[in-house]
Amino acid sequence: MMNRTRRFATFSAIGLTAALALSACSAPAETDTGGEPAAELTPVKLQLQWLPQGQFAGYFAAADQGYFEEAGLDVEIIPSGGDIVPQDALANGDVDYAIAWVPKVLGSIEAGANVTNIAQIFQRSGTLQVAWADSGIESVADFEGKKIGSWGFGNEWEIFAAMAEEGLDASTVEIITQDFNMNAFLAGDIDAAQAMTYNEYAQVLESVNPDTGELYTAEDLNVISYEDTVGAMLQDAIWADTERLASDTEYQETTVAFLKAVIKGWVYAAENPVEASMITINAGSGWGPSHELWMVNETSKLIWPAPNGIGFIDEGAFADTVAAALSAVNESGASLITAEPPASAFTNEWIQRALDELEAEGVDITGAGFSPIEVELLEGGN
Amino acid sequence: MTTETRASTLTRTPGPSRPRTRPPVGPLGRTASGAERAIAPVVLGGAVIGIWQLLAGSGLVEAYLLPSPAAIIAEIIEFWPSMLSAAGITGLNAFVGLVAGSLLGVVAALVASTSRLLDGMLAPIVAALAVIPIVALAPVLNTMFGADSRTGRQLIASLAAFVPVFITTARGLRQTQPVHRELMTSFAATPWQVMRTITLPTAVPYTFTGIRLASSLAVISALVAEYFGGPRGGLGGLISTSAASSAYPRAWAYVVAAIALGLAFYLVTLALERWASRRR
């Protein structure tokens, strides 16, 4: 494929340039934490739900490209290694905004967290359950009696919700806690492993099949996408403090400015996946370049196209997530939530303002012009 | 062994710093102060829980961040069956680990006691084993034994149990009184007879002290090992799952179950220790 080769050549060239630039000077690429912060900038803390990686390319791109600064914000992006629960950090007042999956936060809201979804960045679920092609596992109904991998830490609710629809409860399968990698699946300890399209799925495709000596291909795998099941739940969303959103006009303005900059960052990542992947690598992502590029590209696929504009919360999709969360029961008999969340759980007020302003500026807010690239994964993601 | 015995036969008088052979008598031996000792912690515990409940309900601390004891108790009641099965799973891993680790610890201590050279070789290795972080060990063992097996967790628990049992048993094996050894020498006892009648019975209470120390370690290790993959359903996995969904009262309910499990292990091994020291 001509196109792919050319892209790859460009990408390698950029990689080299970046490597040279990095070795030449060790200064970080971010401009927001640079030497002379302008006096006017409003400090903002953004809590991620994981370590810096392509999944958060839009936020790092917004920082790197100076969109936050243009919006009058000095944004500190705080990673989490699973040790910080983002919505708790937000509810605690430690940060101003947090990125988190909707179902997990629904649980927190029911527990008393006063937070609001202000932008549904990922429009669709990127969770997969991956089995070997000869395993006979082709749908959620085939899970019965099998060893089903999940990371736990609240990432398992889509599995339980999809199983509930098939009349299966947690006791009909053996749930195995997966490390955040595919080793247990590759070793054959798990029949169907949980994987994100943008991360763990690629990890399988970057591994060498010992039988052939080549990398595994999509033909070797059965892939069940939760997006195709009723278990699908909304994922990466931006959460804000409900009370401050209601009463603090300064926070409201900051919110719109922040959302505008974030949207610009995601548009940049969609249009410049190679550059965006270099930005996240420079921000501390530990993945190899081909894996990082895959991640940025797949993340963009979860965001774009966004018919109502990026970040707009589709009420139907939100209601589906709530319904799935109500139906899911884990192995201890616990449900994620027991009642509908309050109306304050989400609002389109601020994202709509940001979208309107950006549309007036001529920004492509629906991703009409977005087309994903082809990424060739190399062994180990390098 | 024999050279040591001969050496002490010559010296006749025991060294001044020789420790007592009998471990100190426990509080159960004195019933009057025993009741006081039992009441004091109960009163203190009750007071702490009372203050906690007041604090959690006062609005000073958000109930969301600090669940009240009442909320935790409600979760304990609601999830009682799940707590029992989870405690059973974690408890079995801890038990297998404790037994295996204790046996290994005793065997290793016996080996170490046979020669100073072996003792010198084993001691630093055990000291190193004692500080291997579970964080590093758990993923390796899970990969070795398969993420679908509990063997890795049991090995982690056994490693945690091994260290105190080895150390206390090794010490116990060095506690024989010269007068006893001299007597055995005068009977022309074989090394095996000396071992069976003097050395081992002296060491047994020390071993059980080690097992008591190891019991809590085995429980906490088996629990923490669940954070790094493997079959779900144990206490550690449920604590992390509940906390990740901000269901803190439920997370704390499972913590209470973990405390109860640890206490059960401790009390049983404490009883064993008492029994072993009384028997002598």
Image (cartoon, rainbow, N blue to C red):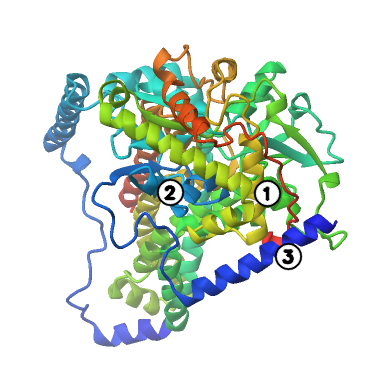
Q: Nearer the viewer, residue A46 or B245?
A: A46
2 and 3 marks on the same chain: yes
Of circles 2 and 3, the one toward us is: 3
| Label 2 Cα neighbours within 10 Å, binned few <14 / some 14-19 / many ≥20 | some
Q: Nearer the viewer, residue A155 or A289?
A: A289
Chain ID of residue with mark 1? A
Reading the image, the residue beneath label 1 is: A184
Reading the image, the residue beneath label 3 is: A9
Chain ID of residue with mark 2? A
Reading the image, the residue beneath label 2 is: A79
Residue A259 visible in this rendered orientation of the protein: yes
Circle nearer the N terminus (2, 3): 3
Circle nearer the N terminus (2, 1): 2
2 and 1 marks on the same chain: yes
How far apart, in angstroms, are the residues tagged by discs 2 and 1? 26 Å
Image point (22%, 40%), residue name: B28
Q: Secondary structure at mark 3?
A: helix
| Label 1 Cα neighbours within 10 Å, binned few <14 / some 14-19 / many ≥20 | many
Q: How far across and how far down the image is residue A360, in percent?
A: 50, 31
